[in-house]
């Protein structure tokens, strides 16, 4: 059996036939490829006009926008045509996808932590002021449905506790005989792939007694 896997390019170099871009200090530019894939019936993109820019503020999970954009990107042009409004963006994207099933979108991303923090605050305020629908991931929906089914089945019966022990987790055992194990130290992990954002910042090292009392 031979299995062939095709991976689409999400980022490419800006075509030389497009008009040149003026790069702003503290920002970087990137060219994204938006594909019109069969089975995806909606773009699922939430963009807002903030300070004269079109900012990606949110997107629907597993949509065209989710596999193309990242939170915090500022849309500059579509196929080389400068875009300044949401309506113009929708019209230009629809036109391009009808012609060749894909389009090239140039975005601007802040590259310094202060600019990322400023944009994050702007997005938070814009999303907070507007109505927003928070959808649960598919795996969470499955667990939710399973839990609700149990509650409906046993709505008149007391639920049996899975964990038997004190509130601090000492000296208790579960039904299958396994003991609850707690890690002594916090494990640092990378940013989950589901957190699709370009606004992450690097925090400074934590201050300790040793670092604050170094010999001069």
Image (cartoon, rainbow, N blue to C red):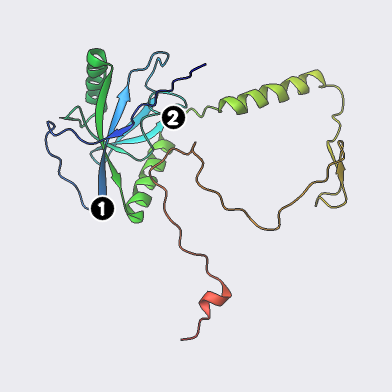
Residue drawn at point x = 22 percent, y = 16 percent:
95
Q: Relative to the observer, which residue lies in front, 89 or 7? A: 7
Q: Relative to the observer, which residue lies in front, 65 or 187? A: 187
- For residue 138, what is the image quadrant? top right
Placement of 23 over or under 135, stated as above or below: below
Provide the secondary structure element on which disc 1 rests: loop
User: Is 1 left or right of 25, judged from the image as shown?
Assistant: right
Name the spot of residue 7 as percent of width and height, x first: 39, 26
Residue drawn at point x = 85 percent, y = 49 percent:
166
Residue drawn at point x = 29 percent, y = 28 percent:
33
Circle nearer the N terminus (1, 2): 1
Name the spot of residue 2 as percent of width and height, x first: 48, 18
Residue receiving disc 2: 131
Provide the secondary structure element on which disc 2 rests: loop
Badge 1, how many Cα within 10 Å: few under 14, some, many 20+?
Answer: few
User: Is 27 left or right of 188, judged from the image as shown?
Assistant: left
Placement of 209 over or under 169, stated as above or below: below
Residue drawn at point x = 27 percent, y = 17 percent:
97
Question: Which mark is on residue 26?
Answer: 1
C-alpha span from label 1 to label 2:
31 Å
Total number of numbered labels? 2
| Image marks 1 and 2: residues in contact by CB distance under 8 Å | no
Placement of 100 over or under 112, stated as above or below: above
Q: Relative to the observer, which residue lies in front, 154 or 31? A: 31
User: Is 142 left or right of 14, judged from the image as shown?
Assistant: right
Numbered disc in front, either 1 or 2: 1
Badge 2, how many Cα within 10 Å: few under 14, some, many 20+?
Answer: few
Placement of 99 over or under 183, stated as above or below: above
- For residue 204, what is the image quadrant? bottom left
Name the spot of residue 186 as percent of width and height, x first: 63, 55
Residue, far front: 1
Q: Relative to the observer, which residue lies in front, 183 or 162? A: 183
């Amino acid at each position: 059996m031979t299995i062939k896997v095709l991976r689409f390019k999400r980022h490419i170099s800006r075509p030389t036939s497009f008009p040149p871009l003026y790069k702003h200090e503290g920002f970087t530019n990137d060219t994204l490829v938006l594909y019109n894939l069969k089975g995806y019936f909606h773009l699922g993109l939430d963009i807002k006009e903030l300070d004269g820019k079109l900012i990606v503020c949110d997107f629907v999970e597993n949509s065209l926008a989710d596999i193309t954009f990242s939170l915090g990107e500022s849309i500059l042009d579509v196929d080389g045509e400068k875009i300044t409004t949401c309506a113009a963006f929708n019209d230009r994207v629809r036109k391009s996808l009808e012609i060749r099933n894909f389009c090239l979108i140039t975005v601007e991303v802040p590259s310094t932590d202060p600019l990322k923090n400023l944009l994050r605050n702007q997005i938070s305020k814009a999303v907070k002021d507007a109505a927003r629908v928070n959808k649960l991931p598919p795996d969470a929906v499955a667990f939710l449905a399973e839990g609700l089914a149990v509650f409906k089945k046993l709505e008149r019966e007391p639920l049996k506790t899975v964990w038997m022990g004190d509130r601090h987790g000492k000296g208790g055992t579960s039904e299958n005989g396994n003991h609850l194990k707690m890690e002594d130290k916090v494990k640092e992990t990378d940013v989950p792939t589901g957190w699709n954002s370009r606004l992450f910042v690097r925090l400074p090292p934590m201050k300790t007694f040793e670092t604050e009392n170094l010999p001069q």
